[in-house]
Amino acid sequence: MLILTLSNSKEYRLKRLKIPVELKCTSLAYPTVLRLAKRINPYILTYRRKLSKDKYESLLKFCRYIDVGKLAYDHNNIITSNHASNISLKLLKRRFKKSVLKLAFKCSESGLLSAISIARNIKRKKIVVATGYYGRPTRILYRLMGSEHMYTVAKSPIDSNRLGMYSYQLQNELYRSGSITKRTKLFGLTGQPLNHSLGPLVYNIFFRRFDLDAVYFRISAVTPHVIKKLNSYVRLTGFSVTSPMKMSFADTVTYDDRFSTATGVVNTLLFRGKRIFGYNTDSPAFMDLLKHYGIRNSGKVVVLGSGATARSAIYACLLMKIPCIVCARNNKDTAEIGKLFKVDSIEATNIRKISPSIIVNTASYSSDSSFIDKISLSKKTILIESVYYPVITPLIERARAAGADYVLGTTLYEYQAVRQSEHFFGAKYSQNFKGICMNVIRYYVERCKKTKKDFLGHQDLEELLYERLPRSLR
């Protein structure tokens, strides 16, 4: 059950929302708390001052549970809050008999796994949550962890982002976390950072529109270990992979298509029991994009960058028999990737000497992106951008100024996501998913152009976008 947290006098008015609430009044005197409890009838009353048994029972007449912090009165309707780092699991099992056990973890990658592991081992009424940005998956998967309740906030939590909470609307409508069961298919995105991804918004709108028992959420991680361990705790179905992990799964997955085998790049995972199968949907997405825009063997392609996405772009060009040159900020990396795929390479210092007809940028706009600025653009140039944060990148701005044709990074994301959806859901839903993906992303791009505000990169990205989406797109 989702519980709406009310923590100040303005929010107390939100009781008009007919949903269970938590009334937080830790610093108020008992008479005031009793008066508020009578008026609001909260599901949970959080009150950390020591009271007599009689006063606890008086408050329990107007609420289902009282969160007392440290154990002061053992009762079926008392919640005892503990920071998991300060107390052992054995002590917790021995110390509390009747009350609901609430465990809060200060979350990191390892903290998330600890929270899920401990939740599975405590066979009693409990609420287990990992706080902060890393811990957000515990707020979505709380039912799978056996938690009695999960806390949300009334409106967008952007002001204070209370310990990583989602809003009630987002958790109830977009993630539908209250209806997640062992039968729910679990999809997600892993890598770091993840704030630029539109995946959770697009996929969960798709699941809701077609009433599919599935959810898509973020797991911030930099090693495959986190995903492997999570799969042993809860049964995963499929995951998207972004940087820096696209080339980290080599020893973990079975390559299941020619694109991942040739490039060593995996951006899509499918879980079948304990086995994990890896796929590369970036290369076919590049091929689809080149075909759609009629780009065939029409001069040389320059691929900027030497990472996982660059490998996928180069391999796509090779399959389409389009000659290409690779260039990266690091000359050693440039030479290595050129040798690996048997394509020409050029050092960053010499990039001004070429005038490519097609530029594919996969390099990030870091502090050292001067080599990107050196490449020449003209009206005859076609720019394909893979970076979509920001939506209008510095290279896109230069292409506009030069009168060159260009393809936004969000467009490439659309092609990649559609290809990925075929692995996740099969051909049955791919066209339906494509329509939702295109509509949501293009709405966002148009909004960026009109308002000149880019929300990608904000840790409350879904919150900001979902509340602005027209009902017809939800």
Image: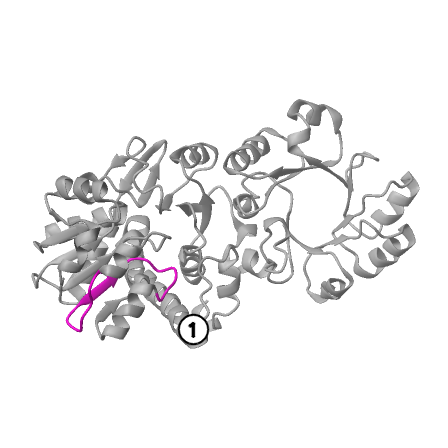
Magenta stretch: residue 384 in it?
yes
- The residue that mark 1 highlights is 447
Residue 237 is left or right of residue 83, and the answer is left
User: Which residue is at the front of the view, 54 or 244?
Assistant: 244
Q: Is residue 415 visible?
A: no
Give the percent coordinates (x, y) of residue 292: 18, 66
The residues colored magenta run: 375-392
Residue at coordinates 31% horizontally, 61% vertically from top-left?
Answer: 409
Give the percent coordinates (x, y) of residue 196: 42, 56
Amino acid type of the residue that numbered disc 1 sits on in the rendered structure: Arg
User: Which residue is at the front of the view, 15 or 264?
Assistant: 264
Residue 331 is left or right of residue 196, and the answer is left
Residue 369 is left or right of residue 162, and the answer is left
Residue at coordinates 29% horizontally, 64% vertically from top-left?
Answer: 395
In this rendering, the answer to whether 77 lies above or below 252 is below
Residue 96 is left or right of residue 167, and the answer is right
Q: Where is residue 436, by image quadrant? A: bottom left
Magenta stretch: residue 135 in it?
no
| Applied colour scheme | one colour
User: Which residue is at the front of the view, 246 or 275?
Assistant: 246
Provide the secondary structure element on which disc 1 rests: helix
